[in-house]
Amino acid sequence: MNHWLMKSEPDAFSVDDLKRKGVEPWDGVRNYQARNFMRDGMRIGDKVFFYHSNCAEPGIVGIAEVATDAYPDPGQFNPKGKYFDAASTRDNPRWVLVDVKFVKKLKRTITLKELQAQPSLAEMALVRKGNRLSVMPITAQEWSAILALE
DNA sequence: GCCAACGTTGGC
DNA sequence: GCCAACGTTGGC
C-alpha cells in the first residue's frame, strides 16, 4: 500500500467538509506530476494525509483514503467551469481524479512548522522551499514518523 | 497583501 | 529547443 499527502485550501474544501460529505471527487488538479501520481500510483485503500494549505496554520489535519481508481475529471469538459481545458477531449482526457473517503480527523493539527523541524522528514517534498506539488507520495517511514507526532 | 518559487506557454 | 513572460501556489 502506498501513502500520500494531498493539499487543499480550507476556504475551498476543508477536512470538515470531507467529514460531512464522506466521499468527494478530488477535482481540479491541473498539474501533470500530481495527475500522474493519482493515475499511476494510487490504489483503492491507499492512505492519505489531508493537508490544509494557504491558511493561518498550514499543516496536516486528517486522514483519508483513496476510494476509486483514477477516472476523467468531468470539469475539464465544462466550458463554463473554471477547470475547463479546451485541449482535452472525451476520447483522450488530459486530467483525471480519484474519489477520496474520510477516515478521521487528527486530534490536532500537525503544523508545517513541526514537520519542518523533524530531521527524519527533511526529504519530503512538502517541507522543501518553494514546493507547490498538491499531491505527493509519502514513504511508510515518513507516515509513521508523522503519526507519532500527533 | 507581498513575493519567491515554480510550471506552462508561446515566440523565435 | 531555448528562454522570457506570464499565471499560480502557498508561506509568511
Image: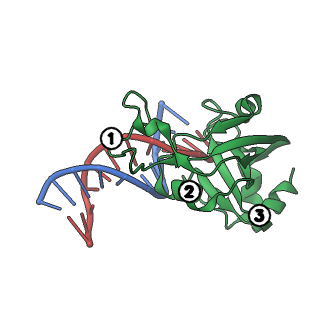
Chain colours: A green, B blue, C red
Query: Circle 2 marks a residue in which chain?
Result: A
Mark 3 crowd level (few <14, some 14–19, many ≥20, 10 Å Cα)? some
Could you say which is closer to the camera, residue A92 or residue A146? A92
- Name the residue that disc number 2 marks: A39
Quote the CA–CA distance across marks 1 and 3.
Answer: 39 Å
Judge if badges 2 and 3 mark residues of a common chain. yes
Q: Earlier in the sequence, mark 1 or mark 3?
A: 1
Q: Residue at x 56, y 56 (%)?
A: A39
Where is residue A62 drawn, in percent x and y? 78, 43
Q: Earlier in the sequence, mark 2 or mark 3?
A: 2
Res. A76 in view: yes
Q: Earlier in the sequence, mark 1 or mark 2?
A: 2
Please tell me in which quadrant of the rendered image residue A77 appears: top left
Query: Circle 3 marks a residue in which chain?
Result: A
Res. A58 in view: no
- Name the residue that disc number 1 marks: A86
Quote the CA–CA distance across marks 2 and 3.
Answer: 22 Å
Query: Circle 1 marks a residue in which chain?
Result: A
Which amino acid, by three-letter code, is at mark 3?
A: Glu
Disc number lying in front (1 or 3)? 1
Could you say which is closer to the camera, residue A18 or residue A8? A18
Could you say which is closer to the camera, residue A72 or residue A6? A72
In this picture, is B2 found above or below A117? above
Residue A49 badge: none
For the residues bearing labels 1 and 3, Cβ distance under 8 angstroms: no
Mark 1 crowd level (few <14, some 14–19, many ≥20, 10 Å Cα)? few
- Name the residue that disc number 3 marks: A142
Secondary structure of the residue carrying tag 3 is helix
